[in-house]
Amino acid sequence: MLLDVHDIQTFYGGSQALFGVHLKMDEGEVVALMGRNGMGKSTTIKSICNLTPPKAGRISFGGQPTDRQPPHKVARLGIGLVPEGRRCFPNLTVYENLVAAARPGRWTLERVNDLFPRLAERRDQLARSLSGGEQQMLAVGRALMTNPRLLILDEATEGLAPVIRLDIWRAIRALKADGLSILVVDKTLSELLPVADRCVVLENGRNAWEGRPDALTAELQDRYLGV
Ligand SMILES: Nc1ncnc2c1ncn2[C@@H]1O[C@H](COP(=O)(O)OP(=O)(O)OP(=O)(O)O)[C@@H](O)[C@H]1O
């Protein structure tokens, strides 16, 4: 097993956000983490990365426990996070942002440039001069340059121009075809469900439903994801 999140409880100060969340992933799986706003998706992701360490429960990645490890050490175990709100170094160029993240492996500057030709065209531009969508591509490219065993995408297509969203979904499908394990949070079900091997739905900080995307009926979608 690649990732084993077992019964975690996570708090923000005195306020409890997760009440015993479970999440298992095998190598090569694409898992959609779903649920309405505020149900605990981002908190689960931040718990996995130890940005908000769980108070109870346990998490292991590649068979190793992640507790008491600072976030940069968890990242080095092989978790590439693209957090909500794109994070690049604004005053570095596209090229500098990518090479600064590089660790040895299959993902090289060339392969990232093939995946996102727009980044190649903007190689020497400062990251802050890119459009929002291009910055998001750069954030994904940076995560890939770390050669992660698990890529985590938290709302990576939120608020982007439609053409760029298509580019990012195309890239996600290519990464899946390449065998990368991906944990993805996204509201665009028409893109998300075809790419997911499994869906895990949270409600009020607890697991509410889990199954294959084709089993997530309109009724279930309405119950767990409807507004
Ligand atoms: N920094 C924070 N401080 C206090 N409470 C927080 C913080 N971040 C999230 N919460 C609370 O934790 C709960 C879970 O939020 P979380 O962000 O994990 O939900 P989510 O499913 O990712 O939703 P969204 O799609 O809105 O990000 C919510 O009740 C939220 O208000």
Image (cartoon, rainbow, N blue to C red):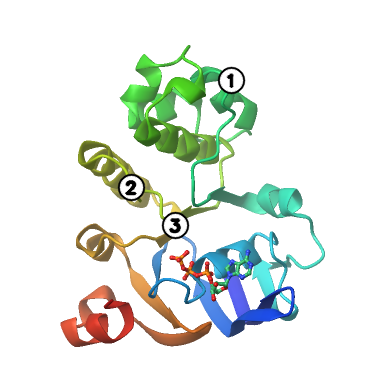
Image-based side of 184 in relation to 127, left or right: left
Real-space Cα separation, disc 3 to disc 1, in angstroms: 27 Å
**Tag on residue 159?**
2
Q: Amino acid at mark 2?
A: Gly
- Between label 1 and label 2, give the one nearer the viewer: 2
Residue extending furthest toward the top? 124
Dot 1 surroundings within 10 Å: few (below 14), some, or many (20 or more)?
Answer: some
Q: Nearer the viewer, residue 111 or 205?
A: 205
- Please name which of the two marks, 2 or 3, marks the residue nearer to the observer: 2
Mark before the other along the chain sequence, 2 or 3: 2
Task: Determine which of the numbered discs, if any, sits on residue 156 in the image.
Answer: none
Q: Specify the label residue 182 is tagged with.
A: 3
* Residue lying at 32% horizontally and 65% vertically, measured from the top left: 196
What amino acid type is highlighted by mark number 3? Ile
Q: In screen coordinates, is 41 left or right of 15?
A: left
At 39% from the left and 19% from the top, the residue drawn is: 120
Q: Position of residue 14 (x, y in %)?
A: 73, 79
Secondary structure under badge 3? strand
Camera-side residue of 174 and 128:
128
Q: Quadrant of ligand 1?
A: bottom right
The amino acid type found where label 1 is placed reads Leu
53 or 78, nearer to the observer = 53
Give the secondary structure at mark 1: loop
| Mark before the other along the chain sequence, 1 or 2 | 1
Q: Say which residue label 1 marks.
A: 92
Residue at (44%, 32%) from the top-left corner? 135
Q: CA distance from mark 2 to mark 3?
A: 21 Å
